[in-house]
Image: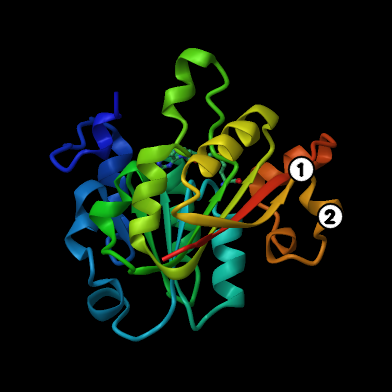
Amino acid sequence: MVDYSFKEDFKYKHENPYHDKLGEFSDFVLRDHEAEAFKGLWNKDVFKREGQLFLEIGTGAGHFMIDYCIDHPEQHFIGLDYRFKRSFHLAKKLSALEFKNFRYLRAKGERIEYMFDENELDGIFYFFPDPWPKTKHNKKRLIQETFLKSAYKTIKPGGIFYIKTDHDDYAEWMDREIKKQSDLFEVILESPDLRSEYPDHLLAKYTTGFEKIFLEQGIQIKAFVLRSKK
Ligand SMILES: C[S@@+](CC[C@H](N)C(=O)[O-])C[C@H]1O[C@@H](n2cnc3c(N)ncnc32)[C@H](O)[C@@H]1O
């Protein structure tokens, strides 16, 4: 059964105090369905200029988002995470930055096709997704048919989907799920040990908050780079 949050008529419901607190940052934070009003309009109405548009799902503490935005001031970047307190702490950090080539969404990654129009994104980053290791929870893993189809829809022809994980079992699951969608994406990089095999790759240039911990524990970073076959 497909998670209800993938469906068009899904309604966000919660009573989390950080939802209101995030309202303090309404100049760059959009909450729940607020982001969906800008489907197809991100460059025109939000950033108000032309530029490549990238999405990061599961932004966490924002290490990648901030470093990448500093390095790519000409691009537009949207960070997205569904955890409230983590979003609030990141919003505080983001509010101190002088540049504003980004927006931040407190929203669910399952809903990207309601936030972005067909071919609106140049690419997606998804780093260290929750692995949902118990078999009964595996269905919560985002990398699966419904999400891969949404990613394919929203990424423009030839656009890229970058993934990193620490988790061997989720990496094997991803490999199977991606192969099932081989009509949609070409796998242009797949590595069981990104840092040894591709030390000069863009994915190895940036270290996320969780990645730093995994590297200190000696865990090898698994990576996939998918190119849309559109
Ligand atoms: C293990 S953390 C990794 C955070 C960051 N990418 C890093 O590498 O440091 C996973 C993050 O993804 C977020 N996340 C997981 N599933 C999500 C979903 N379906 N929609 C939005 N955020 C999600 C979690 O709230 C969490 O902040």
- First in sequence, mark 1 or 2: give its number: 1
Give the residue drawn at x 29%, y 35%. Answer: 17
Q: On screen, 125 above or below 213?
A: below
Identify the disc placed on residue 192.
Answer: 1
For residue 230, the mark is none
Residue 68 x %, y %: 59, 68
Q: Going 26% across and 57% down the picture, which residue do you hit? A: 115
Disc number for residue 197:
2
Q: Amino acid at mark 1?
A: Pro
Q: Are marks 1 and 2 in contact (CB under 8 Å)?
A: yes
Outermost left residue: 9
Quarter-of-image position of residue 140: top left
Measuring 85% from the left and 37% from the top, which residue is drawn there?
Answer: 218
- Quadrant hosting residue 54: bottom left
Q: Position of residue 123 (x, y in %)?
A: 47, 64
**Within 10 Å of the Cα at label 1, are there few (<14), some (14-19), or many (20+) other Cα atoms?**
some
Residue 123, above or below 15: below
Where is residue 216? Give x, y as percent: 82, 40
Residue ranking furthest to the front: 183
Secondary structure under badge 1?
loop
Where residue 143 sits: x, y (%)?
Answer: 48, 39
